[in-house]
Each structure stands twice: as structure tokens, then as C-alpha cells.
Amino acid sequence: MNNTTEALLWFLADGRDFPGHLPAGLLKWRYNENFQPYLHDWSVKVVTKQDIVRTICERLDLPKAKAQEAVQTTFDALITSLVKEGRVELRNFGVFQIKRRAGRVGRNPRTGDIVNVPPRYFVSFKPGKEMDARVRELDKQKSS
């Protein structure tokens, strides 16, 4: 490891030391929304909309075009309802809600200048009981 990597490892966002060495090609540095470095594990698969379409095609024996239309219509309805109503609750999955973050005085990380950050709306997600329980099972599997 070079000094740059070792120095970066010291600045992990959650304060933990990185255990062991970096496996070549698996872990890369990324920066989160607060410009704090974290490790991204590229061996983790990201599920895309096309993966969802493929799963629906296989499970329901539908043509790809119909599955794409169903998925896109679902996402469009979710977004429209969220913008119109401010909250979408899907039992056993979770709750999407529009919230407002207050304006604040911040600092430009590059220049150090003080800047006014305007208030803005954002989407929050709170997982449902079933999703939360299934994710917690991962903790049990990892610890045993």
C-alpha cells in the first residue's frame, strides 16, 4: 500500500479502521454526499430496472415489452402519487415521504467560503416491518 491509501483509510466516515489489506480490484474509493470518503465494494451487484423486468418476465411468463410497461407504469404512478400526496405507503415494503430540509449556513469544502444552503424538499424512505426484518436477518447470518 502506498502512503496515500493508508492516509485515506484513516479518514473512513464512520471512524472504524479498515480491517486488513485492500483486495485488488474489489474496493474503490468513493465520496458520499458530504464529501466523506468510503469504500465501495464493486463485487456487490446493483439491481437495475431491467433486472426487475427480467424477473417479472420469467416469473409471470410475460413478453418483455409488457413487463417493461408494467414496471414503468408502476414507477410513474409511485412518483405521481408521491408528488401529489406527499406520502406513499406500501405495506410490508415501506413508506416514501416528501420532507423539507431547512435552509442553513454551510461551508464550501474546496474554498472554505461560507455559503447559504437554501431549503429544499427531499424524498425519505422508511422500510416496512417485513423488509426491516429480512434485512436484520443479514446481521444474524453475518455474525454466525
Image: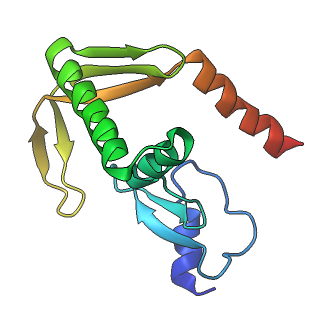
In this picture, residue 102 sits left or right of residue 95: left
Q: Position of residue 32 (x, y in %)?
A: 39, 53
* Up-down relation of residue 64 to residue 95 (above or below): below
Quadrant of residue 3 within the rendered picture: bottom right
The x, y position of residue 13, in whole percent, is: 51, 52
Q: Residue at x 13, y 28 (%)?
A: 119
Model colouring: rainbow
| Left or right: where 49 falls relative to 58 | left
Judged left or right of residue 41, residue 22 is right
Where residue 52 sits: x, y (%)? 45, 46
Residue extending furthest right?
A: 144
Classify residue 124 as left or right of residue 26. Answer: left
Quarter of the view holding residue 74: top left
Q: Where residue 25 sits in the image (x, y, percent)?
A: 59, 80
Q: Quadrant of the N terminus?
A: bottom right
Q: Residue at image x 16%, y 22%?
A: 83
Residue at figure coordinates x 19%, y 57% from the top left: 112
Identify which residue is drawn at 54% across, 63% down. Answer: 39
| Count of numbered labels shown in the rendering | 0
Q: Note whether 14 is above or below 30 in the view shown.
A: above
User: Which residue lies most toward the bottom here?
Assistant: 2
Look at the image and tell me in which quarter the C terminus lies.
Answer: top right
Residue closer to the observer: 19 or 105:
19
Above or below, 24 relative to 29: below
With respect to residue 30, does 47 lie above or below? above
In this view, the residue in front, 124 or 131, is 131
